[in-house]
């Protein structure tokens, strides 16, 4: 029997508890944690749920689960990752990406979404058989490019809200601040990356290191894009110096 703490809508402990499987009382909430990992290549970690897992069997998802009584959010994140994936998350390189609230009859949840920077080879993971059957590291944009995979991930209540920020942080790994040379010869300084206010697309904010030093923006997806020269040679659009 698993006991859950109950919270008010602002995330304060109420001192009340409930048994897992029972409806969450009206105006009270249960804490759930979700972990988004990014490795040094900007890839995120997905896990494929067990074939007989209930609910949502045999689909790609992310590590996460319910906090049990007495656990705070970070403690629950560590336990769930160790149980499901067989490794300890590096909470020193983690931050709480967002806090969300889901309200449905009998299923009121507070959702803490963690972003954790960590490199763990797939072969070093030890999946919990009743929870997980497979895992993979994948670039966030490749998830959206795969309609079936994207549909599975959007079944997660937090996914659409968290996805733009996951893409942004992934691009920050692949396009670090610094000086770059354009394939035509000019030099630029990457100042930061940001989300487009309308499309939520990751954008590179950069300054020209010539002329008046104008500041420009460009979609991050174009930054490391290969360019084919007239002689047929393929080079990166921008090369870090």
Image (cartoon, rainbow, N blue to C red):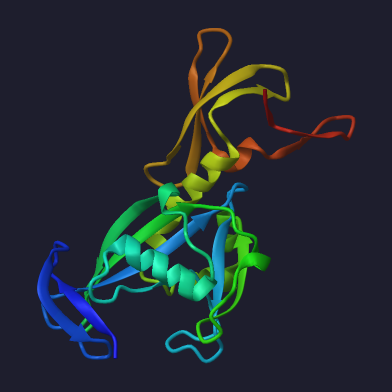
- The residue nearer to you, when weighing 188 against 216, is 188
Left or right of 52? Residue 198 is left
- The residue nearer to you, when weighing 203 against 88, is 88
Whether residue 63 appears in this view of the structure is no
Residue 2: x and y in percent read 29, 86
Left or right of 20? Residue 153 is right
Residue 157: x and y in percent read 36, 70
Residue 91: x and y in percent read 41, 53
Whether residue 54 appears in this view of the structure is yes
Residue 191: x and y in percent read 48, 26
Q: Quadrant of the N terminus?
A: bottom left
What residue appears at the point 10 percent right and 74 percent down from the top-left corner? 15
Q: Quadrant of residue 222?
A: top right
Q: Count the marks: how many?
A: 0
- The residue nearer to you, when weighing 72 against 206, is 72
Left or right of 231? Residue 57 is left
What residue appears at the point 57 percent right and 76 percent down from the top-left corner? 127
- The residue nearer to you, when weighing 138 against 209, is 138
What residue appears at the point 56 percent right and 84 percent down from the top-left corner? 129
Task: Work out whether 50 lies above or below 76.
Answer: below
Q: Quadrant of residue 100?
A: bottom left
* Extreme residue toward the top, this view: 211
Task: Work out whether 180 lies above or below 198.
Answer: above
What residue appears at the point 68 percent right and 40 percent down from the top-left corner? 225
């Amino acid at each position: 029997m698993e006991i859950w703490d109950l919270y008010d809508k602002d995330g304060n402990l109420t001192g009340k508890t409930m048994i897992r499987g029972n409806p969450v009382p009206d105006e009270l909430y249960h804490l759930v944690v979700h972990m988004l990992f990014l490795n040094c290549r900007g890839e995120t970690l997905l896990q494929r749920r067990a074939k007989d897992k209930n609910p949502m069997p045999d689909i790609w998802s992310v590590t996460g689960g319910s906090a049990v009584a007495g656990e705070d959010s970070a403690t629950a994140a560590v336990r769930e990752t160790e149980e499901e994936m067989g490794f300890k998350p590096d909470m020193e390189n983690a931050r709480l990406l967002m806090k969300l609230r889901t309200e449905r009859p009998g299923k009121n949840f507070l959702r803490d979404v963690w972003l954790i920077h960590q490199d763990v080879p797939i072969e070093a993971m030890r999946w919990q058989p009743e929870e997980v059957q497979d895992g993979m590291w994948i670039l966030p944009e490749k998830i959206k490019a795969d309609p079936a995979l994207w549909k599975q991930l959007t079944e997660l209540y937090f996914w659409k809200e968290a996805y733009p920020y996951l893409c942004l942080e992934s691009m920050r790994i692949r396009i670090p601040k610094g000086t770059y040379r354009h394939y035509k010869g000019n030099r630029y300084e990457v100042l930061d990356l940001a989300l487009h206010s309308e499309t939520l697309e990751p954008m590179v904010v950069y300054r020209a290191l010539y002329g008046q030093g104008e500041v420009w923006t460009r979609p991050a997806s174009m930054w490391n894009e290969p360019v084919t020269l007239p002689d047929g040679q393929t080079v990166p659009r921008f090369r870090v110096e």
